[in-house]
Image (cartoon, rainbow, N blue to C red):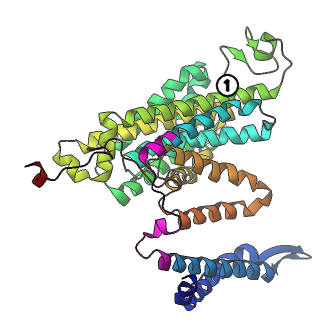
């Protein structure tokens, strides 16, 4: 059987695809790997590194040939299966099994996250990465409401992130508000900005909506860059206060009339206290975002989002106002972006427009799409892979983004609908075990 399948494989087609992929690699890698400037007497000169280019072409040629051959073999083995499922074995598991598995896996991940600062791995470097990953998880869950549940392609989500960060920074600098006082205001202002910007554009759909939201995100960044007297312009805002633990500061010495965390509890001063506190703050904020999203999905507004995502015309015929429904998704998603922005400002102690460029929106959207739109667990896995795993390649310097792109391409090839593509409906008209009786048998 295997021998017959191997004989039916079109190896010439695999060689053709491998050759084209190698040519594409030549075009992409020639300027990146093949040419390097070298300093010599009298100026700079170009140094050619053909061995790097040839090595990349050989790797891509062999990889594409094996991949194309494997795809053909899968199609011949399972001619009626869909392309997505053909790479993986079919699993006939019930939704109850998946629910129990997700619940247990989520519980284990929460326990691991809570105990992580107490483990031997909790160094300053790994805690910083964990805080960064949790921030992107929270942003991904916020954008997942807009993109995954309501089906609105938003390319300007970073605008609400910036709104939260600058709201807290300005309130702290001009009115001496603490992080905890400004946090709800930052979320509220983020939601207000979402509704304000969303109302005139949410009548658009698909690519048109994506283009408009991309423009709105850039407009906010340009305003922050040019409104020098209010936002500080390109210099940004510095000396943003750090969060406190019930008024206890995480500094070596307390400000006038204040107390420090280590002196109150009789501990030696350690910078790790502040990092661990920040870790738990963003962990709690992220878990609250997840809990809110899971609960609101079961409410009528959450079901309206999902129905609108599947078929807007059908929703109109049922009396659902699509603009108001989209606005709620846009506003709530923007609110969580504002919360995350306030945390970003207090963690960094400095904000500037350079922190809120389009690449941030692209990364957050990539986390949602690659994780599987509408899947909370998928966002976690994608954030760990795209943000956490990329940090492990920091030693590769300029080639780190190549590893980032290779990871995205690998996910798109093997899981084109996201890491967790399966999306179980929130509610079913008939349960799985319910058998619909034909009308002819009821007579």
Magenta stretch contains residue 266: no
Pointer 1 local density, CA inside 10 Å: few below 14, some 14–19, many at least 20: many
Quadrant of residue 65 within the rendered picture: bottom right
Magenta stretch contains residue 94: yes
Q: Secondary structure at mark 1?
A: loop
Q: Residue at x 75, y 56 (%)?
A: 393
* Residue 227 pos. (x, y %): 53, 40
Question: Taking the image as drawn, is residue 258 in sight?
Answer: yes
Side of 209 relative to 130 (left or right):
left
Magenta stretch: give its range: 75-100
Q: Residue furthest right?
A: 41
Question: Taking the image as drawn, is residue 238 in sight?
Answer: no
Q: Residue at x 39, y 41 (%)?
A: 330
Residue 358, compared with residue 271, is above or below; it is: below
Q: Which residue is mark 1?
A: 241
Q: Nearer the viewer, residue 75 or 165?
A: 75
* Residue 408 pos. (x, y %): 59, 61
Residue 235, compared with residue 401, is above or below; it is: above
Q: Residue at x 75, y 53 (%)?
A: 392
């Amino acid at each position: 059987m295997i021998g017959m399948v191997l004989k039916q494989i079109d190896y010439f087609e695999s060689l053709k695809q491998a050759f084209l992929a190698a040519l594409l690699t030549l075009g992409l890698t020639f300027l990146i790997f093949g040419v390097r400037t070298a300093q010599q007497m009298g100026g700079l000169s170009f140094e050619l590194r053909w061995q790097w280019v040839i090595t990349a072409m050989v790797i891509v040629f062999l990889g594409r040939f094996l991949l194309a051959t494997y795809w053909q073999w899968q199609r011949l083995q399972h001619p009626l299966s869909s392309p997505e499922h053909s790479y993986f074995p079919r699993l006939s598991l019930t939704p109850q099994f998946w629910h129990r598995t997700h619940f247990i896996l989520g519980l284990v991940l929460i326990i691991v996250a809570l105990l992580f600062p107490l483990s031997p791995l909790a160094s300053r470097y790994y805690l910083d990465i964990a805080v960064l990953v949790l921030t992107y998880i929270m942003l991904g869950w916020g954008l997942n409401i807009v993109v995954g549940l309501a089906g609105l392609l938003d390319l300007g989500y970073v605008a609400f992130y910036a709104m939260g960060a600058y709201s807290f920074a300005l309130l702290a600098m001009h009115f001496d508000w603490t992080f905890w006082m400004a946090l709800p205001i930052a979320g509220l202002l983020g939601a207000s900005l979402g509704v304000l910007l969303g109302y005139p554009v949410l009548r658009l759909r698909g690519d048109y909506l994506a283009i408009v939201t991309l423009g709105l995100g850039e407009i906010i960044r340009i305003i922050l860059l040019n409104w020098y007297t209010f936002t500080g312009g390109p210099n940004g805002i510095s000396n943003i206060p750090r969060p406190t633990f019930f008024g206890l500061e995480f500094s070596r010495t307390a400000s006038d009339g204040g107390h420090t965390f280590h002196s109150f509890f009789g501990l030696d001063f350690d910078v790790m206290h502040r990092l661990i506190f920040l870790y738990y703050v963003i962990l709690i904020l992220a878990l609250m975002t997840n809990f809110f999203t899971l609960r609101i999905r079961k409410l009528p507004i959450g079901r309206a989002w999902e129905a609108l995502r599947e078929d807007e015309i059908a929703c109109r015929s049922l009396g659902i106002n699509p603009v108001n429904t989209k606005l709620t998704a846009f506003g709530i998603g923007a609110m969580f972006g504002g919360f995350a922005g306030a945390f970003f400002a207090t963690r960094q102690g400095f904000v500037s427009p350079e922190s809120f460029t389009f690449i941030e929106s692209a990364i957050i959207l990539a986390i949602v799409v690659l994780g599987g739109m509408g899947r909370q667990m998928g966002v976690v896995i994608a954030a760990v892979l795209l943000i956490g795993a990329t940090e492990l390649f920091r030693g590769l310097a300029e080639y780190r983004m190549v590893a980032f792109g290779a990871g995205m391409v690998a996910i798109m090839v093997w899981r084109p609908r996201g890491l967790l593509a399966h999306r179980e409906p929130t509610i079913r008209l008939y349960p799985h075990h319910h058998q619909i009786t034909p009308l002819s048998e009821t007579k």
